[in-house]
Image (tube, helix red, strand yellow):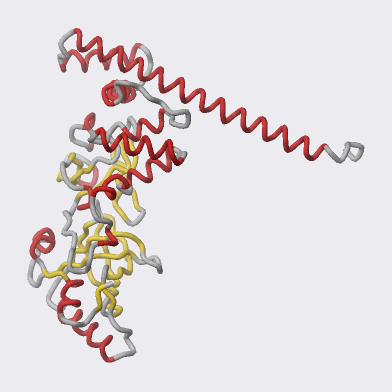
Amino acid sequence: MSNLPDTYHRLRLRVAEILTAGRVRAARAIEREKVTTYWAVGKTIADHLLLLGNQSTYGEQVIRRLARDVEIAERRLYEMISFHKHFPDLRAPANIGWGHFVQLLPLKSPDERDYYLVEAERHGWSTRQLKSHIHEGAYQKTLTPQPAERSAADPLRGRLNTFGVYDLDDDGLDLDLGFGITRRFPAAAVDNWRTVGRNHILESVPASGLPGGYGLSPLEGDPRFRYTYKAGVIRIVDGDTLRVSVDLGFNCAIRHTIRLRGVDTPEMKTPEGQEAKAFVARALADVSFVVIRTYWRGRYGRYLADVFYQAKQNQPQTVVDSGGYLNGDLVAGGLAEPV
């Protein structure tokens, strides 16, 4: 090796670059072919069912038999049909593969699908990046005020026991419980399993025949109403910070320090800071739990949250709907500044 010319290093780097670029082009070519093939399959099946009057029972029999005969998952065939339905005039940009379209299929409106398709093409999003942007509601944020624009006087009263689909495959789904935690559920635990897609909202429902005693049911609702939890107050740190035990559902809990969204109380070393903390202590003295609606992580890794409370109330959703709003009460009492 010592007899190789000095230019060998540059040769090795260039060959490696060419090989890598070739692999990328090959992978993209495979994805493009997969897109056109799956679209064509979806169209062929849809045309066949349309010819026979779209009989639902017959359609289910066809998909079940076809999946077995061509050795492909039923869910994948349904995805192909949905693909043709939602994109009747196929336009597949060079950097958009089948995995991207799978993320777009469950979205409810053509405008939303078109938005993410254009943005994914424009920014070169990977499938994982597209999934993340959909999960975070990038499209909805273009239609409604950003959470950061909501003031302390403008709480979002969410709905307990609602969750988003984080991921999905033929056997089941991963449910987003919040706080970076997901939980796996088999298909049998989900009502109307075939209608459920990525980024749908599900509600937990009692189901005595399932492990843990709970199943899931699709829910029509504002996705912003998620991330609402019953929580026990462990410690009042100061006027705008609480240490809580959060009930994520399904016998899963997490301890976390939350910061009240949209408000800032004085430092604890000041009389005003001590007064704000004392106010919170009095407000929560007769409550057995609070309900929090979390938003995002703040500067120190603490989730920002709206906090609702009501004395001698044992129904968490009632506390959300009609209970006191701690963030706003602090501002109204002159004990905190809105931020």
| Residue in view at x 35 percent, y 31 percent | 102
> Is 38 rendered above or below residue 171?
above
| Left or right of 39 on screen, residue 159 | left
> Which residue sits furthest bottom?
271
Q: In the image, residue 138 lies at what x, y percent?
A: 32, 47
Which residue does the image show at 29% across and 59% down from the upper left? 295
Q: Which image quadrant: the C terminus?
A: bottom left
Count the marks: how many? 0
| Residue located farthest toward the top when viewing the structure as drawn | 51
Q: Is residue 334 above or below residue 15?
A: below
Residues 12 and 119: in front is 119
Q: Quadrant of residue 220?
A: top left
- Identify the residue at horizontal 34%, vertical 89% (top origin): 269
Measured as percent of width and height from the top left, residue 105 is found at 30, 31
Q: Quadrant of residue 116?
A: top left
Front residue of this view, candidates 277 and 44: 44
Residue found 24% across the figure and 9% down from its top: 48
Q: Residue 274 appears at what percent x and percent y?
A: 26, 87
**Residue 148 or 256: which is nearer the viewer?**
148
- Residue 156, relative to residue 261: is it above or below? above
Locate the N terminus by quadrant. Answer: top right
Q: Residue furthest right?
A: 3
The location of residue 52, given as percent across then percent down, is 18, 8
Q: Is residue 1 above or below residue 82?
A: below
**In this rendering, position of residue 97 left or right of residue 67:** right
